[in-house]
């Protein structure tokens, strides 16, 4: 809990200087950001060792996952990818302050070498159709995608099926009755 408190204190401090999250969401940062991110942890495969978080921004969900992994003694190694150098500086500050061993990549997802990740996550980065393109490049052979989506989740899945064949499981969000976590398994372009 101490590390989460440190994280949220840094979020509030840094958010005054750079736009990490909506200022209105800071009043409920625990529910809106931490718990919303933490719910992905329960869907990880037990054998997962590499977690790739795309468009990490303020570290949701990647930094939360890294904190949970350490708390449970998990062997998962988390990589956070963010194109904004200022946000990367924030992520490095959180990692140092919370003594977390995470990898932070500054750059665009499209420029990364294939990561062969067991789990790929992205929160509020892009429509599902585009996320599947990233997942195809960066996931391990049996890797999964975990993508939190809001009230348009069914529309996004339908649109993605025009370009992709994939296994899909929708998990109801624990923090928003209109949202879901889209779990993507087998994946190939149509």
Image (tube, rainbow, N blue to C red):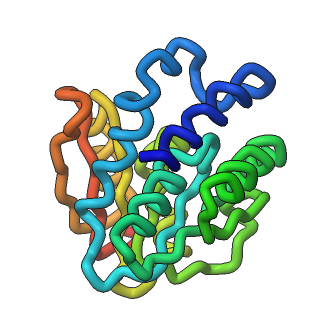
Near-viewer residue (159 or 87): 87
Q: Residue at x 30, y 64 (%)?
A: 184
Up/down of 129 relative to 77, above or below: above
Residue 59 falls left or right of residue 39: right
Near-viewer residue (142 or 74): 74
Q: Residue at x 68, y 52 (%)?
A: 97
| Mark count | 0
Which quadrant would the C terminus be assigned to in this image?
Answer: bottom left
Pinpoint residue 100: horizontal percent, then vertical percent.
60, 64
Pinpoint residue 126: horizontal percent, then vertical percent.
52, 43
Residue found at the far top of this picture: 24
Up/down of 43 relative to 58, above or below: below
Residue 34 falls left or right of residue 113: left
Up/down of 48 relative to 166, above or below: below
Q: Residue at x 74, y 44 (%)?
A: 90
Near-viewer residue (80 or 139): 80
Pinpoint residue 74: horizontal percent, then vertical percent.
38, 77
Up/down of 68 relative to 139, above or below: above
Q: Quadrant of residue 144?
A: bottom left
Pinpoint residue 87: horizontal percent, then vertical percent.
74, 43
Q: Residue at x 51, y 63 (%)?
A: 133
Q: Quadrant of residue 153?
A: top left
């Amino acid at each position: 809990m101490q590390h989460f408190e440190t994280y949220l204190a840094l979020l509030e401090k840094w958010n005054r200087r750079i736009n990490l999250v909506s200022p209105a969401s800071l009043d409920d940062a625990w529910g809106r950001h931490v718990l919303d991110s933490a719910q992905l942890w329960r869907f990880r495969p037990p054998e997962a060792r590499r977690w790739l978080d795309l468009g990490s921004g303020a570290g949701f969900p990647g930094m939360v996952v890294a904190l949970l992994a350490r708390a449970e003694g998990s062997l998962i190694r988390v990589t956070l990818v963010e194109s904004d150098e200022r946000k990367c500086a924030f992520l490095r500050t959180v990692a140092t302050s919370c003594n977390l061993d995470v990898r932070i990549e500054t750059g665009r997802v499209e420029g990364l070498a294939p990561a062969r990740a067991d789990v790929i996550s992205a929160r509020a980065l892009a429509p599902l159709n585009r996320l599947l393109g990233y997942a195809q490049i960066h996931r391990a052979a049996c890797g999964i995608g975990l993508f939190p989506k809001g009230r348009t989740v069914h529309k996004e899945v339908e649109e993605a099926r025009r370009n992709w064949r994939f296994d899909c499981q929708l998990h109801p969000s624990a923090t928003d009755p209109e949202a879901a976590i889209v779990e993507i398994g087998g994946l190939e372009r149509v």
